[in-house]
Amino acid sequence: MQRLRQRGSRMASLSAANLKRKALNSWAAVNDTFFLTKDAFERHRVVFTVGTSIASVATAWIGYSLRHFHDEKVEQRLESIEKAMKNKHNLEHSEIKDIVGPGGLSVPTCAATAATTLIIGYGLGWRGGSWYATKKFRKEQMKLLGQIKPRRWELLGKIKPRGLKFQFLKRPLIRSKVPDTSANTSETIVKNASSKLPDAAAKTSETTVKNASSTHTTGTAHYQNVKEEINVCIWKINVLENSMANKISFPIVIIILVILFWGSAIAGGRRLYPLRTQSSDITALPSFSTEGICSSLVKTQGYACEEHLVTTVDGYVLSVPRIPVGRSRGPRGNRPPVLLQHGLFMDGITWLLLPPSQSLAFLLADNGFDVWIANTRGTKYSRQHISLPTNSSDYWNWSWDELVAYDLPATFQYVHDQTGQKLHYIGHSQGTLIALAALSKDQLLNMLRSAALLSPIAYVSQMTSPLAKNAADNFFAEYLYKLGIFEFSLRGDAVIQFLKDMCKKPGIDCTNLLTTFTGPNCCLSPSIVNIFLDHEPQSTATKNMIHLSQMIRQGTIAMFDYMNIDENTRHYGRPTPPVYDMTRIPNSLPLYLSYGGADALSDVKDVQRLLETLDDHDGDKLVVQYRNDYAHADYVMGENAKRDIYEPLISFFKLQ
């Protein structure tokens, strides 16, 4: 069920190939540090220059003052020696001077003093400049949070003329080599599929996709056509009924459903605008539902639960429910805290979809852990912001880079402050990606006890999911972004109801709906799909989908690529985005990795590539579990996950 990775000889780490790899990694780290420092210097050139000059002069003055004090002490000592020699040996001052030497200023000593002064002064000045830049950044954030009231003259400088629209990118993200034929492609696919359906069904499918294609072209779809969408979905139910009656193969139905989902993302997506130009049409803050995860899914099962809110540095308000004790309501004591982080298109309910006796969150609480459940920005329970409404493009201007830089550190710090203890961490899918990226940047280490990564996502170039692979290869997310759709949502009410009704039909196994995306899951109950559709899928940012698509195409773990040298240089101080170096993850950090042989998103080859970067990890700190029959969804919704995954994981935590 669980095995330690086989460790090679220690002498192998001294081989020429390993030394070369470590040297290249070190050089890359130095390079990244240089560019980041250079970027800070360019933004605060005057502060850094003045600070360095003042620090150099001050250091020189202190250095020469100490030297002068030292010379005075030496002179006093020499005078006492001269007096003693004169009294004892009757030597005159001139004779003593001939014996000791003329003395004088030492050129090497002066050079060493000057060099030391320059280095120390330069370092102090640079450090002071960094402190100033950080302080200025925090001050701006406090202004954003409303904790500092800006001065009147500062407000005047922010007034912009009406009519100016600030685009997120200077140039479109879509590459010129991609033709604008995605609508035609969708039409062709459905025509081919509809040729196998009854005539009435085929005409209905073609009509539906033609309507979606027109939406694709204009990019101006809104929710004004909800009635038409519901009517179309009623027709689609009839289509599937006729399909099943005529024993049409289920893969064709899956193709139709895939197209429906993507059509929902386009037709149901809202075209958003920059906050500054549309402030009169939007509210300052969206209303927050009083019925959170605690009241709807935790307390109803007999567990204590607390709702907590965490505000990130960039203003997003995240919901973090807490299950402090198990169902037995024993004493809280010093229960070790565990933070659960969900994956893409999911939220914190991921860990509560199974019955209480099988859900990981409840199992951890019953086994003596203090459970905290994270909800990523943009999901149902984390859609608040201190100043941005959710229908503005600025609200959705993020990718998983921001989850690494803001969401994860803020949540970690909050839980650490509340409990006073280091955390265990459990991530699934995208939740593993942001953890690995943060650890490679030496973040969170002072607050982390151990980490468990389920279906780890790092390298994704070998991904076999046809849905994800084709969307990335055809620049689907980039196309949506170009149309002005910044919220990527697959959840349309009519589509969800359509799927639920279809899953009630006899002879239909709806667990196969997830196969095209996650791979063939081994252990899902047919009833879990209805529970899943009650809560998922959740929204994410289109920019986040673009970032993940870049990873699939390029095979790297790098920061968001703006596909523009000027934009990359403005954000990163270099023409290409920095890379998250997995070899920098500390070798002494306890890690538990579990991956499946049937997973179409976290492919075995990609996970093996990740494990190669962890070759130098301490043998007693790395546990790797491989389940040949598990796919992506089995890790959070599988009936056997308690026995196969969760119990070994909990045992691992108890040993740390």
Image (cartoon, helix red, strand yellow):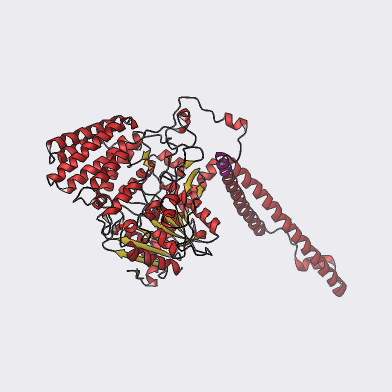
Which residue is located at x 65 percent, y 49 percent? Answer: 55
Which residue is located at x 37 percent, y 33 percent? Answer: 271
For this rendering, which residue is in front, 59 or 154?
154
Residue 16, x across and y down, in percent: 37, 65
Q: Which residues are magenta?
A: 136-146
For this rendering, which residue is in front, 611 or 13?
611
For this rendering, which residue is in front, 187 or 501?
501
Residue 303, x across and y down, in percent: 45, 58
Residue 612, x across and y down, in percent: 35, 62
Left or right: 190 in relation to 100 = left
On the question of residue 175 being in view, the answer is no
Q: Main secondary structure of the magenta part?
A: helix
Q: Is residue 319 magenta?
A: no
Quadrant housing residue 246: top left
Left or right: 30 in relation to 110 = left
Left or right: 91 in relation to 417 = right
Q: Measured along the vertical axis of the image, is residue 393 above or below residue 121?
A: above
On the question of residue 386 being in view, the answer is yes
